[in-house]
Amino acid sequence: MAGSGKAHMRPEGDVVLEVNDLVVEFKLGKNQIVKAVSGISFDLIRGETLAVVGESGCGKSTLGKAILQLPKPTSGSVNFLSKELTTMGKNELRDMRPAMQMIFQDPVSSLDPRLPVSEVIAEPLRVWKRGNEVEINAKIDELLLAANLDPSVVRDRRSYEFSGGQCQRISIARSLALDPTMIICDEPVSALDVSVQAQILNLLQDMKDRYGLTLIFISHDLAVVKAVSTRVMVMYLGKVCEVAPPEELYQNTKHHYTKALVGSVPIPDPDRPISGNLIQGEPPSPLNPPSGCRFRTRCPQASDLCAQEEPQLREVSVGHFVACHHPIGE
Amino acid sequence: MSSFNTVAERPLPFAQDAEPGVYLADPSRRLKAYLLDSIIIGIIFGIAVVATNPTIAAIVAGAIWSVLNIVLNTKKSGISPAKKKMNMRVVDAKTFQPLNLVQMILRRGLLGTIVGEAGLIASVVIPSLVLNAIGLSNGLLVVVATVAAVYAYASIPMRNSRNRNVWDIVSGTQVVFDKFDTLTTPIVETKLSLESDLLTIEGLNVSFATPRGNLKAVRDVNIQLPKGESLGVVGESGSGKTVLSRATMGLLPSTATRTGVIKFRGEVISELSSVEVRDLWGTGMAMIFQDPMTALNPVRRIGDQLTESLTERIGMDKRAATERAIALLKRVRIPDPEGMLKKFPYQLSGGMRQRIMIAIAVSCNPEMLFADEPTTALDVTVQAQVLELLTELRKEFNMSMILVTHDLGVVAGHTDRIAVMYAGDMVEYAPTRSLFANMKMPYTEALLKSIPRLETPTGTRLPVVEGRLPDPTKDEPGCPFANRCDYVQDKCRAEKPPLKDDGDNHFYRCWFPLGGGK
């Protein structure tokens, strides 16, 4: 991977979000630029769950924030519900915000510790003047019930009285308050226990079906992604490696980086210990990414071609795209 | 007294130039000890020379010194306080058996004394005669200085011959040092106890005083951990797994009350004061903390943090400690270890910082390593590398390890035994294979099922453990898991099940175990 290209874009379908050549760079002192996201394109069809997978520092969270224009990307276009977000003015953009929401990684710190739960959820409704007090109260109860919380018990409590899993339920309820079209979930379960993780993943799935949501699910855990996504995009150092439906991606892995990620997932079986030898070291600095394919410094199959030429995304089977000069099995 | 075999068997991870399996006294540290000796010997000679004829004085004083040194060497480490602190001992160079008094006199004594006396006579008598001949009868200072210099020279340990000095080579002996030098128990007892379990926990209870009442974090836990084995402690947040490992190490806050017996190397450490327990840290037991971002000191360089325990605990000098720090960094696969010493923690990624934490934890070669969620803050690819590294180091250094985690996938491939904790109770305790093949506890099964797997088809609902842990401040009757259990029956709510053994070292706490029970 670690390449560019738009072969995976779909011309047909009810496209909710279309991102083209998105670049996010941060200045770091003089003459130093962190290349967090380098020319990523993808589209999102209504009702889909796109999982964005990669190691820390691959730009997956930056990508999620850039879509929400927090802050605005350096270049590229973000087309949401047929409207271009990058060129929008402040007020126009604000009007778009209710339709796109975010769920954050740390559920406890993303809730205001001074507000009771009912206020946490009511705040967006009040700001957007959605109904009178009675309607707002009814909406709060509906959302809390949908998130499997008992409104009569939790309404007046504050976030510090809850466990991480309960806080994440409250965050999910809050993100649904304004009936959004798309929710970006930034590592929503990585701070939670395994048993709670399953509860939250199921809840997200229920909410998606119930409210007809389109999700971007950012995670570093391929096993979690497998459970929830309809399409997976593997990122490495600001570029796309591989795009495929989850079943296809795991059974017919084409990219060496994806293979390493899949192989690193701990399996609860003493006869199948995970191997740390699939991939060595850590990603290079995004200040000075390698030439050509960005993964070549850690890739077992790297050749001279990889250093000279950046691989482009190409279709290897229906719906399965890979950016690699030497994909597995070829 | 045959117990030094164990010392010889223990690998020496730091002195790269030494032969494998030998515990050597650090050369520079040892040199300091001998220089102190030189000063003492110089004073004895000085008094003798002032009092009488220099030649006779030299011989008499030398003899007194030798006898004193030999006798004391069989017990402790000679006269010098520096040597005593290091617990240096003289052993046979080939067999690593400690020398008894007779051997000491015959080998270190006779051979060493002949060489030593010859040197002394040559260095004292000849200059004295020369000084007398040219009329400078008061050459006292010169004589004393020469003696000290010769003695010191002969004492310099040679780095490439197992750090031995002239005395050692002539007498075919070897000075080793015992790394448990700060322990109050005699070395021999410590070594013998290595034959049995390294760590034994009997009836451990930990509770915290909170405004809501007494919070019972750990209830009646029993664990035996043989040397070199690894134990995985698994459970949800709040199950008491972290408190268990901290209680064992003596790292509890003052609001905690701990009862029960903890034995380490056969010695009861639960009765020790906090100052005495501190002597075990680093050399006896060490801990890797969950969050590598906050466990390192942000304002000190990596090199300082890595050498701190080496200089403070083992008493290495700065130069030797730096050498060892570089070797350790290489071992945990950090590129450019020399450059790393100069860096600050904020310059490193999470994976790098966790490697540094591991290097610090194993630096003093502990026998027991606690790893408290060592990979939770890391990426999956880095997690795989760190787990692999821990397992390698454990085998290489022959350490026992307690790996605390909430992820059954992490412990499956890296432990010999697993203890599953629930609400402070140990609910299942079994060899890893037996646990996965023959699961007894409904809770363990529920925990295992809730892990998302690569094999699960997309879109399937994950089985969840509904509900939460019971309130740890209340002591309710019945099984604490009863309210969340799929197989619950009336008996479960009425009576708390005891920990039962199925006869195969597989313990479980359930009235109606999966697959039946005995």
Image: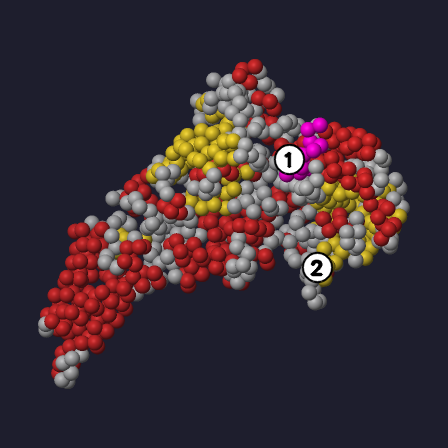
Residue drawn 27% across the image and 58% down it: B81
- Say yes or no: labels 2 and 1 on the same chain: yes
Please say whether residue B112 is visible from this viewpoint: yes
Image label count: 2
Q: Which residue is mark 1?
A: A162
> Which numbered mark, 2 or 1, is in the foreground of this view?
1
Q: Which residue is mark 2?
A: A34
Rendered location of residue B180, percent (x, y): 34, 48
Q: Nearer the viewer, residue A66 or A39?
A: A66
Dot 1, crowdedness within 10 Å: few (<14), some or many (≥20)?
some
Q: Amino acid at mark 2?
A: Val
The residue furthest bottom is: B134
Residue drawn 79% across the image and 54% down it: A72
Rendered location of residue B497, percent (x, y): 49, 20
Q: In the image, which residues are magenta?
A: A152-168
Q: Chain of mark 2?
A: A
Q: Amino acid at mark 1?
A: Phe
